[in-house]
Image (tube, grey):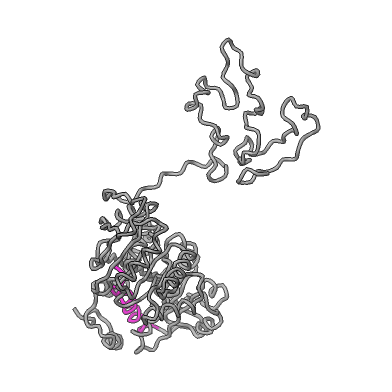
C-alpha cells in the first residue's frame, strides 16, 4: 500500500515523500481513509507508530478543499495535554502542509499571550492548543469556533483524565455540535473509553496492537532496590553500562530537581523538565538532550508527553507511576519506529501494589533482577500475575450530611457499634455503663464525666452536622455537678479538623 492509494492530494504526497516516507504505517493505513470519509475515529496506537501523521495528513486534505478561515475563526482544533506535544503536532502540520495555502498556529501557556492573540486575528485553518491557554484566549475574544469543522484530541486518555476533564468540558460547551471528532492515543482504559463514547458519534475504532500493551522491541526489566539506594543505583547503572542518552521518570517536580542535582554531583550531565520550568528552559533542556550535550533528562509524566526523540535507547522509571497506563506511555519513548530499546524500573517494597497493577494491565510479568551491591533489605514480593483486570472501587455509602470522611451515628463519636463492643452486649448505648447485677449501676448508670446526651466530652474534632438538627449545643462551663451550670455557658466553638478549638 502507498500513500497515494489512501486518497491524498499531490501537494501532500510530495511533502510526505520529501520526509522520506513511502509506505503508511498500520495506524495511518486504517485511520486516514476513515477520517477522509468524515467519520469520527477512536484510534489506539503505541507512541512512535506514526499516529500524529495519522490525523495530520487527512486533516490537511479535508481543509484544503474548504473556505479559508475568517478573522479570529478556527476550522480545526487540535488539543494536546502539554506544550511539548503541542509544538510537535504544530511542526507536523507545518511539514506536511507546506505546499498548501493554509494558516496554522500553536498556542500554549508559559509564554506571552499577546503574540498568540495577534496570530489568531486573521483566523487560522488549524489551531494546536493546550486547554488552559485556549480558554484564556477564548475568554479574551481572541478565538471563535463558528467555522469549526474538526476537533482532535491527541493523547486522549490523558486529555480526558481527571486533571483535564473540566477544561475539556468547558471547551466542548462552546464548540459546534455538528463536527467531526477524532481521538488518538497510545492507550484507552475502560473508564476513559466509556467517557469518550459521549464525545464521538458512531466512531470507527482503530487499534494496531492490543489495548494497553507495551512495544515488543522494548526490553523491560525491574531492579529491586531500597528507596534510599535508588539514586546511587541509577548513577551506577549509567556509568557501568556507559548509557549516553537516558530519559528518567519521577513522580514529582521536587523529585526531578533533587535527582538532577545528585546526578550532577556524581559527574553525570543532567537536566530536569517539569511544569515549574519556563517554556524556554524546557525547550533548551530538550534541545541539549537531543544533541547529546546532556546525558540524562529527568522528567515528570506530564512534561514528557510529546517528547519526540529518535532512537532513544534507555528509559528509566525512577518512581513507578500511580496510574498503570502511564507506564505504557513512559516506555513508549523508546523502541520507536522499529528500533530496539530498554526500559528499566527501580522498584522498592512500597511500590509493590503499583507494580502488580502495571503487570495486570499489560498482562505480562516483568523480569526482576538484583544488582550486586544494591540488594534490598525489604524485597519486592514476587507476586503471581493476576489477569482479572483492575480492582473495582467499592461503592460509596450514602451521604448522611456530615463532613467527607466522617463516620455517622455512633461511629462518628468514636465508639464501636453495640454489636461489636462487649460492654454493649446488653444493647445499651455508648456513654452508659451496663446495669450492675441487682439492677444498680456504677455512678447511677452514668459514666463519670460523660455528658447527658451520650456524647464524649473534650475536643473530639467532630462535625456539627453529625448532631441532631446539625447544631452544636451550648455547653456549660463545668461538668454536670461541678456548679458551673448557672450562667456559665460558653459561646459555641467549631472544632477544626485536628480537634483544636
Q: Residue 385, position in %: x, y?
A: 26, 50
Residue shown at 52% from the left, 23% from the top: 424
Is 52 colored magenta in this rendering?
yes
Asked which quadrant contains residue 267, the reply is bottom left
Is residue 202 in sight in this rendering?
no
Magenta stretch?
45-66
Q: How many marks?
A: 0
Residue shown at 50% from the left, 82% from the top: 120
433 with respect to 253 (left or right): right
Q: Residue 251, position in %: x, y?
A: 43, 62
Q: Observer-nearest residue: 125 or 266?
A: 266
Q: Residue 13, position in %: x, y?
A: 27, 86
Asked which quadrant contains residue 354, the reply is bottom left
Residue shown at 29% from the left, 55% from the top: 359
Residue shown at 43% from the left, 67% from the top: 300
Is residue 261 in sight in this rendering?
yes
> Seen from this angle, which residue lies furthest front?
373
Q: Is residue 144 depicted above or below 17 in this figure?
A: above
Is 357 colored magenta in this rendering?
no
Q: Is the C terminus in the top left, top right, bottom left or bottom right quadrant?
A: top right
> Seen from this angle, which residue lies furthest right?
487
Q: Residue 409, position in %: x, y?
A: 55, 34
Amino acid at each position: 500500500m502507498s500513500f497515494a492509494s489512501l486518497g491524498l492530494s499531490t501537494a501532500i504526497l510530495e511533502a510526505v515523500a520529501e520526509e522520506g516516507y513511502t509506505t503508511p504505517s498500520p495506524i495511518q493505513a486504517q485511520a486516514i481513509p476513515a477520517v477522509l470519509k468524515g467519520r469520527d475515529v477512536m484510534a489506539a496506537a503505541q507512541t512512535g507508530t506514526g499516529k500524529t501523521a495519522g490525523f495530520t495528513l487527512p486533516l490537511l486534505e479535508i481543509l484544503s478543499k474548504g473556505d479559508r478561515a475568517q478573522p479570529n475563526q478556527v476550522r480545526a482544533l487540535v488539543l494536546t495535554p502539554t506544550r511539548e506535544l503541542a509544538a510537535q503536532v504544530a511542526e507536523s502540520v507545518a511539514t506536511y502542509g507546506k505546499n498548501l495555502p493554509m494558516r496554522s498556529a500553536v498556542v500554549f501557556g508559559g509564554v506571552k499571550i499577546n503574540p498568540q492573540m495577534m496570530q489568531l486575528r486573521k483566523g487560522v485553518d488549524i489551531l494546536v492548543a493546550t486547554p488552559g491557554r485556549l480558554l484564556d484566549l477564548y475568554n479574551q475574544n481572541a478565538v471563535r469556533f463558528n467555522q469549526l469543522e474538526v476537533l482532535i484530541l491527541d493523547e486522549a486518555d490523558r486529555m480526558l483524565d481527571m486533571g483535564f476533564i473540566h477544561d475539556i468540558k468547558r471547551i466542548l460547551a462552546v464548540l459546534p455540535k455538528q463536527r467531526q471528532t477524532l481521538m488518538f492515543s497510545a492507550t484507552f482504559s475502560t473508564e476513559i473509553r466509556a467517557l469518550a463514547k459521549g464525545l464521538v458519534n458512531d466512531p470507527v475504532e482503530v487499534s494496531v496492537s492490543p489495548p494497553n500493551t507495551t512495544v515488543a522491541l522494548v526490553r523491560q526489566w525491574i531492579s529491586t532496590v531500597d528507596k534510599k539506594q535508588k539514586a546511587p543505583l541509577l548513577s551506577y547503572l549509567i556509568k557501568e553500562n556507559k548509557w549516553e542518552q537516558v530519559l528518567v521518570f519521577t513522580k514529582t517536580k521536587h523529585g526531578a530537581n533533587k535527582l538532577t542535582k545528585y546526578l550532577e554531583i556524581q559527574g553525570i550531565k543532567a537536566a530536569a523538565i517539569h511544569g515549574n520550568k519556563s517554556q524556554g528552559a524546557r525547550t533548551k533542556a530538550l534541545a541539549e538532550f537531543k544533541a547529546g550535550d546532556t546525558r540524562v533528562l529527568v522528567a515528570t509524566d506530564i512534561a514528557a508527553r510529546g517528547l519526540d526523540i529518535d532512537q532513544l535507547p534507555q528509559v528509566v522509571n525512577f518512581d513507578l507511576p500511580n496510574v498503570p497506563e502511564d507506564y505504557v506511555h513512559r516506555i513508549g519513548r523508546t523502541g520507536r519506529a522499529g528500533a530496539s530499546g530498554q526500559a528499566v524500573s527501580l522498584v522498592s517494597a512500597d511500590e509493590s501494589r503499583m507494580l502488580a497493577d502495571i503487570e495486570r494491565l499489560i498482562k505480562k510479568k516483568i523480569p526482576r533482577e538484583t544488582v550486586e551491591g544494591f540488594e534490598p533489605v525489604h524485597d519486592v514480593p514476587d507476586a503471581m500475575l493476576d489477569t482479572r483486570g483492575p480492582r473495582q472501587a467499592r461503592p460509596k455509602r450514602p451521604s448522611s450530611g456530615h463532613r467527607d470522611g466522617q463516620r455517622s451515628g455512633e461511629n462518628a463519636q468514636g465508639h464501636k457499634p453495640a454489636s461489636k463492643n462487649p460492654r454493649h452486649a446488653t444493647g445499651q448505648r455508648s456513654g452508659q455503663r451496663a446495669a450492675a447485677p441487682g439492677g444498680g449501676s456504677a455512678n447511677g448508670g452514668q459514666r463519670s464525666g460523660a455528658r447527658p446526651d451520650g456524647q464524649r466530652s473534650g475536643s473530639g474534632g467532630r462535625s456539627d452536622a453529625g448532631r441532631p438538627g446539625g447544631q452544636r449545643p451550648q455547653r456549660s462551663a463545668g461538668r454536670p455537678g461541678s456548679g458551673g451550670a448557672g450562667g456559665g455557658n460558653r459561646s459555641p466553638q467549631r472544632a477544626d479538623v485536628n480537634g483544636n478549638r
